Every structure is written in C-alpha cells, then in structure tokens.
Image (cartoon, rainbow, N blue to C red):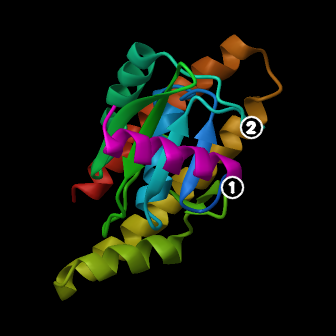
Amino acid sequence: MSNKDNNLKEEIVNLISQGDNDRIEFRHHSGGPNLLGKIISSFANASGGKLILGVNNKGKIVGCKKDDVMDTFNKSKEKLIPCPIVSIEFIEIDKKVLAIISIEKNQKIISSSLGVFKRINNSEEIMVTEEIKRKQLNAVTKDEIKDTVGEMAQQISQLTITLEDTIQRYRSQNKLSRKIIEWIACGIIGIVLSMLIHL
C-alpha cells in the first residue's frame, strides 16, 4: 500500500471524526441520481467539497457497493446543467469500500434536476433569485446579457421553490404516487432549466 493511500485513509478517518460541515458530507448511500445531482450542484454552487458515501449518520463506516455508486454517479452527472468538475475515487477502510466524490467550486450556476441549490453549513439550501443573478452576472461580461440573466435567475428560483413545494405536499402520499410525481416534476424542471441556461 502506497503512502498516498495511507495518507488518504488517515485524512478520511480524521474527517469522519469531525462530521459534516460546509465542505464535507457523509452519507450511507447515494440516494439516487436526482438527489446525488442536487448534492453535487449544491457544493459546486458554494465552495466545492467532498461527498463521502459509505458512512452512516453516527460516523460508522458501513461501506457501499462500488458498481451501484458508479452507476448512480454517472447518471447524476446527466442531471446537471452544466456538469461541474467532479471526480470519484474509492478507498477501503476496515475491509469496507468508501466512495469519495470531489466537487470543485464553479463560477457559473449549476442546476440539478431538482432545481438550484447551494451548500450552507451541512445542508443544501435553495438559491434565491438575487443569489442566482449575482453569481451568473459575475460570470458574464456583456451588458446585453444582464437583463436576460436576471429574468432567468428569477425563473429558475421560482421553479426550484415550486418543485420543493410539490415534493413536500406529496411526501405524505404513498411512495409510488410520490415517485411518479417527482419523476414528472424533475423531467419538466430539467427541460425548462436546460432551455433557460442555454439562452
């Protein structure tokens, strides 16, 4: 085993002992492509960070299935517009596999199929219109684009809030109905966001 591997394992064990923060999140599993895309985009829209899969909420290493995580990871990247610089690596600690997803901060807004989010403390928060507008304006230089960006930011923010409200309303319904509504809503939001961001 190389020094690099040993150093990475020590770093991860140290991070686990510290718990979640604005740059690190631990999850038992990926939660599916839509949720994983949301988490990745929230890091990219903030300061970047790492998502470590295979650690439960008590900090216990439980491991993950490499093939399943890779499949979800690849599908989640398809849910992001545009896809940020993101990488994945796997390490083994105590004979259990952990996935480490590293996400770089992005200058432009990254939207997911669930909307536009940013990482605050140890959770994903909806980005409001002014935040989206400010971040997008910082990334463009042409004056004639500014009005379009402002309108786009307002629409994206509203779509995100609408989607979150829809998901909350259907949480109490049975799982199949909730899943169908989420899939339809994610598809519609994804199409609209794709058109808006590529204006």
Q: From the viewer's perspective, is 193 left or right of 156?
A: left
Amino acid residing under circle 2: Asn
The residue under the point 39% across, 70% down is: 151
For residue 105, say whether it is visible: yes
Label ID, residue 18: 1
In the rendered view, tell whether residue 56 sits above or below residue 19: above
Q: Nearer the viewer, residue 8 or 159?
A: 8
Callout 1 crowding tier (Cα within 10 Å): few <14, some 14–19, many ≥20: few
Q: Nearer the viewer, residue 84 or 93?
A: 93
Label ID, residue 57: 2
Q: Earlier in the sequence, mark 1 or mark 2?
A: 1
Which segment did they paint magenta?
1-19
Nearest to the eye among marks 1 and 2: give it. 1
The residue under the point 29% across, 57% down is: 197
Place of residue 40 in the rendered image (x, y in percent of width and height, measured from the top left): 45, 47
Callout 2 crowding tier (Cα within 10 Å): few <14, some 14–19, many ≥20: some
Place of residue 17 in the rendered image (x, y in percent of width and height, measured from the top left): 69, 49
Answer with the quarter of the image where residue 54 lies.
top right
Amino acid residing under circle 1: Gln
For residue 116, say whether it is visible: no
Q: Secondary structure at mark 1?
A: helix
